[in-house]
Image (tube, grey):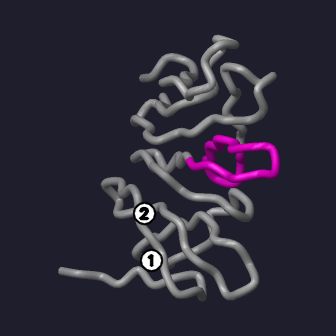
C-alpha cells in the first residue's frame, strides 16, 4: 500500500522517520513566502506542523512519540526534541563556537544521537554526540 502524505501547502516534502504507530516526521515546503518546516504525520490526522519553528526538519521519532529535529537560525543550527507540546533545546558540546547540534536518531528511552561542534578549539568539524536522559525502564 502506498500513501501520499501530501505537503503543508508547498510543492514538496520529505519523510525521514516512522515509528510503529505510523507516526512520521520530516520536512515540508509551505505556501510561499513561508520557509520549510518540520511536520508530524499521523494516520488519523494527516500532516501537521511539528512546531519546531521555521526552517526546521523533523528527523526521527520513537515509539513513545518523542521526536527530534533541528532548526536553522541566523547563528547556526539548533537541535531540538519534542514530546507533546514541550520542546527542549539540545546543548552543544562547544557553545562558544556558536550553536550547532544536529540530532539524527532517538531510541525508545529517549537517548538521542547526532553531531555537535567539537569541544577541541583546533577542530572546526562536527563530532559524534549522544544526549541521554534518566535511566530507561
Residue in the picture at 31% in, 54% down: 20
Q: Is residue 4 magenta?
A: no
Where residue 115 appears, x then y in whole percent?
53, 31
Residue in the picture at 53% in, 39% down: 103
Q: Is residue 25 visible?
A: yes
CB within 8 Å, label 1 to label 2: no
Q: Is residue 94 above or below residue 63?
A: above
What residue does disc 1 label?
44
Q: Nearer the viewer, residue 125 or 18?
A: 125
Residue at the far left in the pictured view? 1
Q: Is residue 6 above or below residue 28?
A: below
Query: Is the magenta region chiefly helix, strand or loop?
Result: strand
Q: Is residue 137 above or below residue 64?
A: above
Give the structural element (helix, strand or loop) at label 1.
Answer: loop
| Residue 23 appears left or right of 69 | left
Give the structural element (helix, strand or loop) at label 2.
Answer: strand
Q: Disc 1 and disc 2: Cα gap in Å?
A: 12 Å
Name the quadrant containing residue 5.
Answer: bottom left
The residue carrying pointer 1 sits among few (fewer than 14), some (14 to 19) or many (20 or more) residues within 10 Å by Cα, namely few
Where does the magenta region start and end?
A: 69-87
Location of the N terminus by quadrant is bottom left
Q: Nearer the viewer, residue 107 or 135?
A: 107
Q: Is residue 110 visible?
A: no
The residue carrying pointer 2 sits among few (fewer than 14), some (14 to 19) or many (20 or more) residues within 10 Å by Cα, namely many
Where residue 118 appears, x then y in whole percent?
61, 20
What residue does disc 2 label?
24
For marks 1 and 2 on the same chain, the one whose residue lies earlier in the sequence: 2
Where residue 109 appears, x then y in whole percent?
45, 30
Name the quadrant containing residue 14.
Answer: bottom left
Residue in the picture at 78% in, 32% down: 98
Q: Nearer the viewer, residue 107 or 123?
A: 123
Amino acid at each position: 500500500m502506498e500513501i501520499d502524505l501530501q505537503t503543508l501547502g508547498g510543492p514538496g516534502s520529505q519523510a525521514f522517520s516512522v515509528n510503529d504507530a505510523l507516526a512520521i516526521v520530516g520536512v515540508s515546503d509551505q505556501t510561499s513566502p513561508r520557509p520549510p518546516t518540520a511536520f508530524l504525520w499521523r494516520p488519523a490526522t494527516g500532516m501537521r506542523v511539528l512546531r519546531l519553528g521555521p526552517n526546521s526538519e523533523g528527523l526521527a521519532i520513537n515509539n513513545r512519540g518523542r521526536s527530534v529535529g533541528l532548526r536553522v537560525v541566523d547563528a547556526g543550527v539548533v537541535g531540538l526534541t519534542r514530546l507533546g507540546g514541550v520542546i527542549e533545546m539540545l546543548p552543544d558540546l562547544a557553545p562558544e563556537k556558536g550553536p550547532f547540534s544536529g540530532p539524527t536518531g532517538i531510541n525508545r528511552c529517549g537517548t538521542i544521537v547526532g553531531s555537535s561542534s567539537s569541544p577541541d578549539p583546533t577542530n572546526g568539524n562536527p563530532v559524534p554526540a549522544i544526549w541521554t536522559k534518566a535511566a530507561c525502564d
